[in-house]
Amino acid sequence: MSDPPLNVPYWASMYRVYEEDNEQYLQALAEPDLVERARQLWKWKDLSRRIPFTDIAPVISQLDMDRYVEQRPSTAVRNVRDRLRDEGIISGSGLVTPSFLLHLAASGPNASSATFPIYDRRVWNAYAYLWGIRERGERLYRAASQSPNQYGEFCQAFRESCPDGDPRRYEQALFMLGGFIMDLGTDEKPTAVETIDRVLSEQEQAIEQMQDRTGYAMVDVGAVRTQ
């Protein structure tokens, strides 16, 4: 297993601003029934705007998810997407909804799935930047890839680089990095890779300078507490 190409503890710690969301997620995964998991997290994942849960609930209950999660991610997401299209639930080629159902089915009450991680445009763009899918001279994507093969490559990269035993924390780190680098864009255009390189390099240099001058990075919590 290769080390993750980012500081997981740092970026995952930023997810604390979503602590209430995380509690909701953990409570939902404690439900043994897939339909109930999805019901509790449909709005949480922002899927309710396009697909009313009442429309998809009967289809979820009929899906043979045990069979799908035994397939390769690229095959599984294609098959679930096609089934949802056949049922008239989705009309396009997007993978966020089928990948989320796979994630819920493959995850347990104590841990997220490292084989079928959370997939959306934030984690996709974090992956695209960190693994060099988007190179210098290019910009990030507006949305997550709709290619089952590229989704499968993302899942493989996630699984191979995930710190042992904590896929959820790794998801959180990618989510926060993805949101950060996407917000660096200007004029409503996706962020240029050069901009990401420059900003992250400046941050690294600033941290190094603070460490050299004061012996701590970002904030001296001990000093704050004694003020």
Image (tube, rainbow, N blue to C red):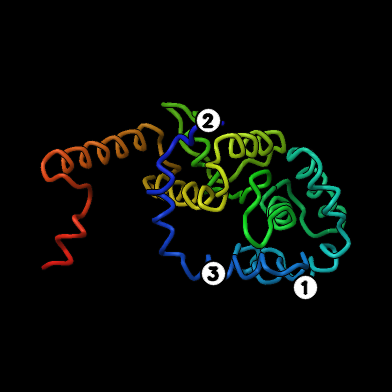
Q: Are marks 3 and 2 in contact (CB under 8 Å)?
A: no
Q: Please give the residue where the numbered disc 1 appears in the rendered image.
A: 54
Q: Amino acid at mark 1?
A: Thr
Name the residue: 45% across, 42% down.
190
Q: Helix or strand or loop: what does disc 1 sit on?
A: helix
Label placed on residue 23? 3
Q: Please give the residue where the numbered disc 2 appears in the rendered image.
A: 2
Name the residue: 29% across, 35% down.
201
Badge 2: residue crowd in 10 Å (few <14, some 14–19, many ≥20):
few
Direction from residue 31 to residue 217 in the image, left or right: left
Q: Amino acid at mark 3?
A: Glu
Q: Position of residue 35 (x, y in %)?
A: 77, 67
- Point out the tag, 3 or 2, that comes first from the N-terminus: 2
Q: Helix or strand or loop: what does disc 2 sit on?
A: loop
Label placed on residue 141? none
Q: Position of residue 89 (x, y in %)?
A: 79, 60
Which dot, 1 or 2, sits closer to the camera? 2
Q: Position of residue 161 (x, y in %)?
A: 55, 36
Q: Helix or strand or loop: what does disc 3 sit on?
A: helix
The number of callouts visible is 3
Badge 3: residue crowd in 10 Å (few <14, some 14–19, many ≥20):
few
Asked whether the viewer can see residue 10, the reply is yes
Spatial separation of the CA atoms under disc 1 and disc 3: 24 Å
Spatial separation of the CA atoms under disc 1 and disc 2: 42 Å
Q: Position of residue 90 (x, y in %)?
A: 76, 56
Name the residue: 42% across, 39% down.
6
In which quadrant will I find the C terminus? Answer: bottom left
